[in-house]
Image (tube, rainbow, N blue to C red):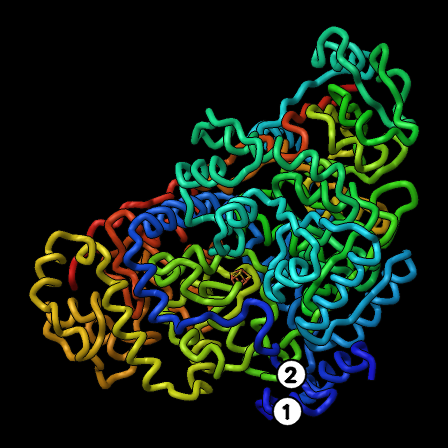
């Protein structure tokens, strides 16, 4: 007997009482119950130590350039809108990890943002890129369109495609392992900047 | 049919089986009361624990209060888990199909031995002599690191707390914060002693300690080709797995290597993608007290050009089928490992995680470990509780831990002896302040020499001092409620604010979940073991509203 058959056999035997379970109640606020409030999003992002800037699309490139400083190397995913790219930005075309880690910052779009939890979700679309590019640089700048902001977790789940690689980000990397003090910045990017578009 | 199958039927193929002996970390070397006595002598440990659990309860209560539908989410979470258990075979088969369709490989491991063999073999096949690991209860449960070392493979724990534990040659003591028993200066000392290349000028400032870990592990992340993880959930409908974390070490392990091996207990499967909308709200708020944890990674099989190109999922039984077979005990499998029950538990707060012997400490450990191993192998754990009910109130998936404890006590082989031993230990738990006082020295001196007669100090000290019998005839519970002059649960309405009646099955409260679990009322108490040192107050476990982050609890330390 294979272990697969063994385990499935054990589990079936364990359920010999044939429990009948009703459909789970879902009386919580479902997707679509609330409007997304951008101010709540900003409040929650800031609370978890992200920095938020409200800018127009035309201001993105200059804002990013200002954040990384002169000569800073900005990595972008291949599908990032050209308008957003600061001068001298380099695109990921399958770069090796050390090149990615060498970037001063990475600039991406996002798939969805959750106002209530201050969460940004990346789904590896061409304007967000491979997961590795938002992991190794120390600064992540993420551009959000207002229409991408939803109110709650159920709204986000309804919008996302489960089969894409998903990264849910709520503030910069943090740990509470030392006496429960939240310390920003362990292994992931130590700085998260969110550019919320106003146009 | 209350118990369709039991541990003793494990010899029959296809019957539910408990976790085997001699491998993994589900059994302690010593019974709980003995281990607890030692822990109680460590006042630094108690201080660290108290600070940590108090902090986390306050944070958790505040973010839970932000959600108007917390109770509805708990109801949904509980019901979804009940549903999962009732159709586990079909869900596992569906999950397997989806993972395979998405380019993953699925392995089935009947027990710890088999899981260790599978994972070790997979690593050896890659030729790598080192693996990076994300904190995972399942791999601790099966003793995977020991199996790696026996096979000449070096496992590197990448979670900061696990790293502290590993460098300190120590054991984890908390599900979520494994180094909760270490404070900053102890961590600094461990790093200075055991972290290669560490800056000798290291201070004990937490950001400085975190930065040291970042530097130390960066190169390892980039150069290791194999990672091992656990999983917080797996979606049968889509084949999607997820890891919830904070530091980014999880993202590193789940993104950078060529090969990813995930070990997951079979109970972690969820039916549909939509179910995540419930658990992603419950888990972070109950666990770390955050609206959302910093990072959650979800992946479905293999994505060409992005992340590991070889993905293996190891589905682990190791006693879970035996837990499932007990209709009265199976809800212990609903646990999402948030650790909220630890953080509200007065026994855990005094004894720490190590006393429980198993990798699963605290209230959930007291019901899960004995079921995974068979009650005989963890016979004292079901008694390691006062049945105060705080764990039930705190649990985001509403596991009725007190009722499970009572059920398991009835299955313990020597219930009377266990009760007596625990009652003795409980007296000490009740009086850490007394225990630590100068008075103690005098009394200990006075009773010196009585040691061989019965209980060793400090128990003998207390009994001598209090002039009480060493082994009361009553059950622990009766004994306890008798001496607190409060009605035994569930008779009286809980004072408001005060303890809920715990075991009664309702939440005893209108608003957010944890509110009913405690309150600063000194008249409350019921069967709680809690008579904490002055600032301990379980009250912050409750009070989901920010204003109620009450932490004072004058009146709790009286002798009642
Ligand atoms: S039993 Fe409940 S409260 Fe305890 S760790 Fe599990 S889910 Fe959390």
- Of residue A44 and residue B337, the one placed in the foreground of this image is B337
Residue A107: numbered disc: none
* Left or right, residue B171 beside residue A70: left
| Chain under callout 2 | B
Would you say the residues marked 2 and 1 are in contact, meaning their CB atoms lie under 8 Å apart? yes
* Residue B15 picture quarter: bottom right
Residue occupying the point 66% across, 56% down: B278
Q: Horizontal and vertical percent for residue B388? A: 36, 68
Quick one: SS at disc 1? helix
Earlier sequence position, callout 2 versus callout 1: 1
Neighbourhood count class around disc 2 (C-alpha, 10 Å): few under 14, some 14–19, many 20 upward? many
Residue occupying the point 80% across, 64% down: B236
Residue occupying the point 85% across, 10% down: A87
Residue B17: numbered disc: 2
Q: Horizontal and vertical percent for residue B310? A: 86, 53
Residue marked by disc 1: B9
- Of residue B351 and residue B27, the one placed in the foreground of this image is B27
* Residue A44 picture quarter: top right
Q: Horizontal and vertical percent for residue B98? A: 87, 62
Furthest residue toward top: A70
């Amino acid at each position: 007997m294979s272990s697969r058959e063994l385990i499935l056999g054990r589990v079936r035997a364990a359920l010999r009482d044939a429990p009948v379970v009703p459909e789970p109640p879902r009386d919580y606020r479902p997707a679509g119950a609330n409007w997304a409030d951008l101010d709540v999003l900003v409040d929650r992002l800031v609370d978890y130590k992200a920095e938020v800037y409200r800018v127009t699309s035309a201001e993105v490139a200059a804002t990013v350039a200002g954040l990384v400083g002169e000569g800073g190397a900005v990595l972008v995913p291949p599908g990032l809108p050209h308008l957003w790219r600061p001068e001298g930005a380099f695109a990921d075309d399958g770069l090796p990890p050390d090149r990615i880690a060498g970037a001063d910052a990475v600039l991406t779009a996002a798939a969805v943002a959750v106002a209530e939890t201050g969460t940004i979700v990346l789904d590896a679309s061409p304007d967000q890129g491979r997961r590795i590019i938002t992991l190794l640089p120390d600064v992540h700048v993420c551009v959000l369109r207002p229409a991408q902001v939803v109110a709650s977790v159920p709204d986000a789940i309804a919008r996302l495609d489960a089969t894409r690689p998903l990264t849910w980000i709520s503030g910069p990397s943090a740990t509470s392992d030392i006496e429960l003090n939240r310390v920003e910045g362990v292994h992931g990017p130590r700085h998260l900047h969110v550019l919320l578009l106003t146009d | 049919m209350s118990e369709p199958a039991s541990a003793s039927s494990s010899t029959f193929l296809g019957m539910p089986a408990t976790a085997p002996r001699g491998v993994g970390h589900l059994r302690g070397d010593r019974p709980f009361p003995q281990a607890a006595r030692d822990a109680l002598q460590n006042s630094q440990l108690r201080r660290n624990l108290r600070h940590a659990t108090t902090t986390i309860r306050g944070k958790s209560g505040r973010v839970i209060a932000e959600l108007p539908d917390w109770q509805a989410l708990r109801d949904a979470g509980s019901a979804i888990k009940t549903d999962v258990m009732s159709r586990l075979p079909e869900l596992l088969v569906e999950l397997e199909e989806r993972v395979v369709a998405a380019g993953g490989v699925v392995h089935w491991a009947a027990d710890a031995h088999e899981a260790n063999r599978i994972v070790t073999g997979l690593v050896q096949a890659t030729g790598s002599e080192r693996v990076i690991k994300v904190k995972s209860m399942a791999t601790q449960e099966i003793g995977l690191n020991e199996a790696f070392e026996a096979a000449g493979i070096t496992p590197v724990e990448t979670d900061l707390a696990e790293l502290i534990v590993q460098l300190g040659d120590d054991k984890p003591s908390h599900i979520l914060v494994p180094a909760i028993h270490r404070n900053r200066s102890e961590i600094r000392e461990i790093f200075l002693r055991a972290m290669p290349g560490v800056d000798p000028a290291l201070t004990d400032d937490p950001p400085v300690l975190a930065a040291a870990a970042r530097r130390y592990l960066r190169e390892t992340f980039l150069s290791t080709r194999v990672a091992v993880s656990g999983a917080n959930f797996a979606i049968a409908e889509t084949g999607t797995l997820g890891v919830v974390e904070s530091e980014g070490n999880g993202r590193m392990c789940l993104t950078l290597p060529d090969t990813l091996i995930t070990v997951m207990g079979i109970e972690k499967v969820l039916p549909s993608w939509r179910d995540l909308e419930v658990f992603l709200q419950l888990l972070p708020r109950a666990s770390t007290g955050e609206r959302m944890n910093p990072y959650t990674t979800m992946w479905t099989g293999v994505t060409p050009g992005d992340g590991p190109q070889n993905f293996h999922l190891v589905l682990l039984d190791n006693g879970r089928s035996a837990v499932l077979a007990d209709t009265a005990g199976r809800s212990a499998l609903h646990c999402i490992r948030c650790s909220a029950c630890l953080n509200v538990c007065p026994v855990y707060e005094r004894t720490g995680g190590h006393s429980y012997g198993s990798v699963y400490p605290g209230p959930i450990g007291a019901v899960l470990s004995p079921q995974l191993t068979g009650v005989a192998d963890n016979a004292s754990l079901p008694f390691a509780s006062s049945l105060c009910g705080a764990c039930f109130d705190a649990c985001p998936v509403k596991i009725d831990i007190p009722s499970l404890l009572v059920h398991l006590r009835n299955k313990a082989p020597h219930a009377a002896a266990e009760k007596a031993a625990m009652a003795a230990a409980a007296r000490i738990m009740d009086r850490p302040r007394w225990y630590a006082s100068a008075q103690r020295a005098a009394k200990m001196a006075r009773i010196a020499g009585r040691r061989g007669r019965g209980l060793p100090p400090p128990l003998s000290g207390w009994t001598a001092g209090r002039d009480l019998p060493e082994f009361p005839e009553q059950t622990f519970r009766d004994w306890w409620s008798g001496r607190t002059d409060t009605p035994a649960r569930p008779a009286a309405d809980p004072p408001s604010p005060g303890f809920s009646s715990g075991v009664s099955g309702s939440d005893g409260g209108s608003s957010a979940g944890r509110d009913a679990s405690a309150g600063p009322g000194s008249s409350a108490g019921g069967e709680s073991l809690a008579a904490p040192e002055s600032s301990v107050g379980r009250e912050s476990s409750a009070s989901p509203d920010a204003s109620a982050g009450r932490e004072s609890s004058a009146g709790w330390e009286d002798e009642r």
